[in-house]
Amino acid sequence: MPSQLWATLLLALAAGGPRPGAPVARVVPNDNRTPAGTMRNGALTVKLVVLRAEWYPEDDNGPHIAVPALGEEGKAASIPGPLIRVRAGTVIHATIRNAFPDSTVHMIGLGGADSVELAPGQQREVTFTAGAAGTYYYRAVIGKRIERMGNELETAGGALVVDPPGGSPADRIFVLNIFTQPGDSGLTNEALAINGKGWPNTERIRMTLGDSVHWRLINGSVRPHPMHLHGFYFRINAAGNGTESHEIPPDHQMLAVTEQVSPWDTRTLSWVPDRIGRWLFHCHLTFHVVPDARLGHRHGPDVEIRETPSVDPGRHMAGLVLGLIVSPKHGEPPRDTPKRNLDLYVQQGPRLGRRPMTLSYILQEGSTPPAPDSVRTPGSLIVLHRNETTDITVHNRAAEPVAIHWHGLELESWSDGMEGWGGSGELIVPPLMPADTFMARLSVPRAGTFMYHTHINDIEQVTSGAIGPLIVLEPGEQYDPTRDHVYLGGWNGPEDETSPGCVAPQSGPACGPQIAINGDSLAGPTLTLPAGVKHRFRFINLNPAIDIRYALMKDSANAAEWVPLARDGADLLPALRKPQPAAQAVAVGQTWDFEITPAAGALVLTAGPGRRATWRQRLIFR
């Protein structure tokens, strides 16, 4: 498409409406429950149109944005696009019409990975046979086939599901969408949605205690998303890249609470809700779940990030969030009896490094509470034991409301830490206001590596240090820091793009974000450790937005070897416990555990974004 025409299209999109004279269509959200097209004699006929339409991702009378969208001929356009669902071997006859008067459309994923090109106003037909059972994604790219973060307004897409000949168990399909609208003076306007709506307008997913839940998850955006489930583990049964899909052999399937889904990727998840109450499923990139993820919130270098802390989940969350409601079958289960009691203090201190302030979780040790001005980043390491129910009383000494989510723990909804949403029935978890206390009951049915963190005013509080590590040991096991090593990655304050020469998304000492491991952005202290014995490394990523790659290096070019033990606190199956090079990317909201038995000598542990190590620690084994 000529650059002048593309510039005209961008200006029309930025204005929030179609160009003068163009028909105004309105997008409807698609819950992916009703397949498109007509089945006749074992073949599906579907007629699709690609057009420009107005999308209302918040409430139906709220802010809107003009976007490319897909629809069936004669029906409303939808986000995501129409669901195409058939059984393997079905012949699909698709008619595709490009309703853009001045833009080429490339349709990808209907009949294979190759694209079908449609000139402005052109209509084409595609006939293909549905192949292997799985979850796929078809999409239309507007203009040149360039798909990158800066061109999120160019793509529209929908789910394509192929069921096995005998059919699939009842499931739900969730598609993630992001559209970014360019604006004046470097400002942008974003819309983030699951099945066409952003929180708090996303669908409430209702289920009953003990249900078998099957989800198909599709990332319909050009950004990766670490999707996190509160309170439960899911099993990852299948994975794909949009045009290919494969079942994961049972002996290689993982349990997880956070799964990184790359652009256009698909996942099939299954799980059983075994506790009642209200829960969340959301992206763990902080910027995708906070108020500025809401359409109408302006983004740019001169826009203040901080929102007045709100205790209303409809205000302090937005974007890629689903609310889950688990109803009881035969009454509510009884609460466990606590075997241990702990006190945890939320402390606030002055600015530290780039942090706008310092927030810290300090565990009381002994009979005396910590001094009011004591802070540490990250928060105290909490050590629990499997099947030892623990009550933790949280005391808020900060000047604003706080919350603590016990990430990865299988616990009751009341204690999950989602203020304004968690709980069951008429009981709703209150925010922890200044000078107040809240008691969380932690049930810990499995040993592993976990974390805890704030879930309110997330960007500022997380980057200020309101994060901490939590490990669960087997009964009777004692924590030995000479053989058990915990590394928690965060940020040394929010992004800083004001320094000379800083252009997002650079990172490093001069411009942010700056990754900090166990509170330090450059190096950890040299450690002398025993050789010839097993060492467990527990890696946690709790920074707001960036994968952290941890590596254990023999020299600058060669990694040591370790054995993966667990992910997200769940032990890996034996087939996955194989020696491998000691390097692992840990997505936001994930934990990974590895084991190594080092010989005498020195190793260097590194961490940083991608393959660029920005933090180092020397380990000497004797």
Image (cartoon, rainbow, N blue to C red):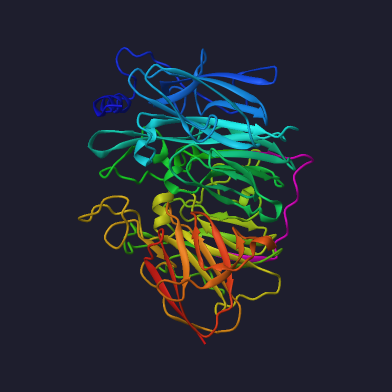
Report whether 35 appears left or right of 541.
Answer: right
Question: What secondary structure is the stretch in magenta mostly built from?
Answer: loop
Q: Is residue 64 visible?
A: no
Q: Decide: is 386 above or below 414.
A: below
Residue at image coords 38%, 72%: 523
Report whether 104 appears left or right of 335.
Answer: left
Q: Which residue is at the front of the view, 115 or 258?
A: 115
Question: Percent x, y for residue 32?
Answer: 59, 28
Question: Percent x, y for residue 603?
Answer: 46, 78
* Furthest-bottom residue in this view: 622
The stretch in magenta equals 325-343
Q: Decide: is 101 above or below 391.
A: above
Q: Does 338 lie within the magenta span? A: yes
Report whether 131 appears left or right of 375.
Answer: right
* Furthest-left residue in this view: 500
Question: Percent x, y for residue 170?
Answer: 70, 33
Q: Which residue is at the front of the view, 354 or 358?
A: 354
Report whether 104 appears left or right of 255.
Answer: left
Q: Does 335 lie within the magenta span? A: yes
Q: Which residue is at the front of the view, 461 or 158?
A: 158
Question: Percent x, y for residue 437?
Answer: 54, 56
